Image (cartoon, rainbow, N blue to C red):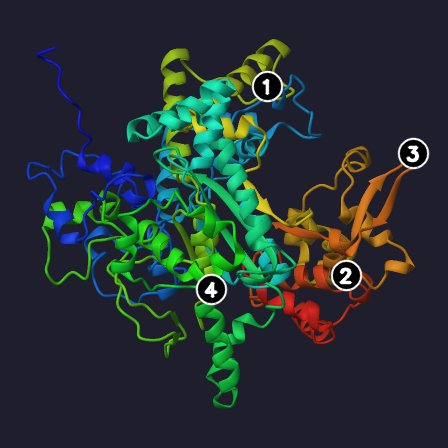
């Protein structure tokens, strides 16, 4: 016992695991730092920057573009505190900041299933690309690809691309994978195309430690009714509450799902009036942090927001003073950054935020009278930013190496404290500023504060020139991935080295000239490599008990009111038009004609019915539908003799999701995909029969002419294609 000592977490570990949610929101006494200077001064003096691993905490490989410039990386740790242009609607996000780097990288590669490689080398109709790619891999090629991926986030090595792509295919079928995060990202982008720019960003972090509902759920799950009643009556000590929460991750998962589901049902209330106005669409993703607790990031689309990107310009019109005042009233009614700290402190001495006054909450008139005071009390307890070591997550290395600089604006990654704003309005740069009278209160909504009674974040996405960059930024933040792609290649190189040391020389590429037994050995060697690589990648992913229970209970990791999704590969669409349109083939010439992929066999096409296969045969009733509307309005089904088209009800329309790149740059000059963007725009928004008969003129000019004839609704969708 004399030799036992308490293991305290290091400063680096604290930056990863310290709580962001205020102590008072978790039923604890205030113990955080109210000043960033006090926090910096608390760093252990012997702390040695050279001896600590900053790679995970302060990685520069997972950088994220700032909303102002998609091509600009996040500043390094030495420049975090310098004066920069701040996007006000996100910089006051005092819970999960949009200012820190989110992982842009590709995915965690998941398991390589045994049936991907069978004994038939011609199972795809051609020689197996996986075994060929593996046979060509060398340690030097893997290292070069790793370095290239670090710098450009892509690789020009075709064999490396084959390896990563084939592993990714199976990731989409795996739970809790990064491939699933990429699918979520494409869903958000599809909604951006369908409904325009989102208007509101939300973060919800339910209190699963001392919430009374969570406590009752956990106790009644673990004990019989009479024992549960006795325990609830005696459950006052903080340690008991925390122990109960940590020992029952199932209750935490159930509570989180219940809380978030009710939030969207009662607060968002899509299609009806709500505390946010009338919301047409929403999409949110469930995420876990280093401590394993669940939280939610989401986007809300206002109904009728097709002209939202023009809002700043419309409000700048001197003749629109009434409209400008109306928008400001809306903003002030939904978003708040004001706090009466003295009033909140007085109430806090009498009760805790988890203990609402029953008489007030049960009476509409009483709640109306006490609404402002109650929301102020919750904001005081749950929304005031307290500096913890997570504030130094991206600046710790610079602080340790260079020391504190009095000229630095702030070392806090949330940029707190925030400046006081006298009244709500828009700056000359088109940035929204909300009235603020307290430097440390995080933006909140009064109704959410009173109802949820825990920390949350709500921000409006309104910018002038940075709108799409902001959407791109927060989309990647809401679906941020675990690790960069280059680490996948590094793991593959390590596995290849181990196999080489254990098994000697590598055998030849499989082919018809090899004997059957030798060919099987080659195939087994590539299988072993891919399986071990996938297993190494699996082992890098840490899962919390709550996260695992959440999945095992069958809960979805995203929330949306979109009833259906339809999927389309844009490269397949391009080659479909290429085969149908003689004028495109003529402009492309022999190079592209030689590069086009083989057409799938009739058996494969019947096995997997695609809209590209049947759109040209949709019939005269649907002949005026473009492909985008067809994918949304028509459901394809199989019958005994073939296939049938079923019209969806308007409230069941699908949102098309596109896999592949498309933009509004019609001057693109690709050596293989000639006029790719113009061709894809024509294929998506113009009925094919209207342009594939044309044989004269530049393809971009053909698109420009057809675009002028689109209906206003379709013309609205077109400029959103920047993903």
In this rendering, is residue 234 above or below 185?
A: above
- The residue sitting at 40% across, 35% down in the picture is 293
> Mark on residue 334?
4
Q: Badge 4, how many Cα within 10 Å: few under 14, some, many 20+?
A: some
- Disc with the residue nearer the chain's start (1 vs 3): 1
Q: Which residue is mark 1?
A: 114
- The residue sitting at 75% across, 65% down in the picture is 686
Front residue of 311/644: it is 311
Q: From the image, which quarter does the C terminus lie in?
A: bottom right
Circle 4 or circle 3, nearest the eye? 4
> Mark on residue 328?
none
Check whether the beta carbons of the residues at disc 1 and disc 3 lie within 8 A of each other. no
Find residue 123 and report its image quarter: top right
- Disc with the residue nearer the chain's start (2 vs 1): 1
Circle 1 or circle 3, nearest the eye? 3
Query: How far apart are the alpha carbons under marks 1 and 4?
Result: 53 Å
Secondary structure, mark 2, is loop
Secondary structure, mark 3, is loop
The percent coordinates of residue 610 (x first, y second) are 76, 44
Q: Which residue is mark 3?
A: 640
Can you see residue 646? Answer: yes
Query: How far apart are the alpha carbons under marks 4 and 3?
Result: 54 Å
Q: Which residue is mark 2?
A: 626
């Amino acid at each position: 016992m004399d030799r036992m000592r308490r293991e305290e977490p290091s400063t680096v570990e604290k930056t990863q695991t310290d709580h962001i949610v205020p102590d008072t929101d978790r039923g604890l006494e205030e113990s955080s730092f109210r000043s960033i200077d006090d926090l910096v001064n608390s760093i252990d003096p012997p702390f040695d920057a050279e001896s600590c691993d900053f790679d995970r905490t302060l990685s520069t490989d997972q950088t994220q573009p700032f909303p102002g410039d998609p091509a600009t990386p996040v500043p390094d740790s030495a420049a975090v505190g310098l004066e920069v242009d701040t996007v006000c609607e996100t910089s006051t996000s005092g819970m999960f900041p949009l200012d820190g780097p989110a992982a842009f990288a590709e995915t965690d590669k998941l398991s390589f299933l045994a049936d991907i490689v069978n004994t038939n080398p011609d199972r795809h109709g051609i020689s197996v690309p996986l075994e060929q790619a593996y046979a060509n891999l060398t340690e030097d090629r893997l290292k070069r690809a790793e370095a290239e991926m670090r710098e450009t986030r892509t690789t020009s090595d075709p064999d490396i691309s084959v390896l990563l792509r084939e592993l990714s295919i199976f990731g989409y079928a795996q739970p809790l994978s990064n491939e699933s995060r990429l699918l979520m990202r494409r869903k958000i982008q599809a909604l951006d195309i369908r409904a325009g720019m989102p208007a509101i960003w939300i973060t919800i972090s339910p209190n699963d430690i001392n919430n009374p509902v969570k406590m009752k759920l956990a106790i009644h799950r673990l004990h019989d009714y009479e024992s549960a009643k006795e325990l609830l009556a005696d459950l006052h000590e903080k340690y008991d509450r925390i122990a109960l929460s940590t020992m029952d991750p199932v209750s935490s998962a159930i509570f989180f799902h219940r809380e978030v589901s009710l939030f969207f049902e009662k607060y968002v209330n899509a299609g009806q009036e709500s505390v946010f106005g009338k919301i047409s669409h929403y999409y949110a993703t469930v995420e876990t942090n280093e401590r394993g607790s669940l939280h939610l990031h989401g986007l809300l689309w206002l109904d009728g927001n097709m002209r939202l990107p023009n809002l700043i310009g419309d409000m700048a019109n001197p003749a629109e003073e009434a409209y400008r005042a109306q928008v400001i009233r809306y903003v002030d009614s939904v978003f708040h950054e004001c706090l009466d700290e003295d009033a909140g402190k007085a109430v806090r001495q009498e009760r805790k935020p988890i203990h609402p006054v029953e008489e007030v909450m049960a009476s509409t008139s009483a709640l109306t009278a006490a609404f402002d005071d109650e929301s102020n009390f919750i904001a005081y307890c749950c929304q005031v930013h307290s500096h913890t070591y997570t504030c130094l997550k991206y600046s710790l290395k610079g602080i340790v190496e260079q020391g504190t600089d009095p000229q630095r604006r702030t070392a806090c990654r949330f940029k707190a404290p925030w400046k006081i704003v006298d009244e709500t309005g828009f700056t000359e740069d088109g940035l929204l500023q909300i009235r603020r009278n307290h430097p440390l209160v995080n933006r909140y909504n009064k109704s959410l504060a009173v109802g949820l009674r825990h920390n949350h974040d709500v921000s409006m996405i309104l910018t002038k020139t940075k709108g799409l960059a902001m959407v791109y930024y927060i989309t990647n933040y809401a679906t941020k991935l675990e690790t960069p792609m280059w680490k996948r290649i590094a793991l593959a190189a390590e596995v290849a080295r181990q196999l080489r040391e254990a098994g000697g020389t590598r055998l030849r590429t499989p082919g018809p000239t090899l004997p059957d037994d030798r060919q099987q050995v080659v195939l087994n060697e590539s299988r072993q490599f891919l399986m071990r690589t996938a297993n190494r990648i699996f082992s890098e992913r840490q899962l919390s008990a709550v996260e695992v229970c959440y999945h095992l209970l069958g809960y979805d990791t995203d929330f949306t009111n979109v009833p259906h999704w339809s999927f389309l590969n844009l490269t397949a669409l391009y080659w479909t038009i290429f085969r149908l349109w003689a004028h495109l083939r003529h402009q492309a010439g022999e190079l592209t004609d030689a590069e086009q992929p083989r057409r799938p066999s009739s058996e494969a096409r019947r096995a997997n019915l695609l809209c590209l296969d049947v759109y040209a045969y949709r019939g005269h009733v649907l002949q005026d539908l473009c492909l985008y509307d067809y994918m949304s309005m028509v459901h394809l089904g199989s019958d005994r003799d073939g296939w049938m088209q079923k019209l969806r009800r308007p409230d069941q329309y699908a949102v098309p999701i596109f896999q592949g790149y498309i933009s509004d740059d019609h001057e693109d000059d690709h050596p293989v995909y000639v006029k790719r963007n113009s061709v894809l725009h024509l294929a998506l928004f113009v009925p094919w029969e209207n342009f594939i008969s044309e044989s004269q003129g530049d393809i971009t000019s053909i698109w420009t002419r057809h675009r002028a004839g689109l209906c206003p609704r379709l013309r609205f969708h077109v400029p959103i294609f920047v993903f």
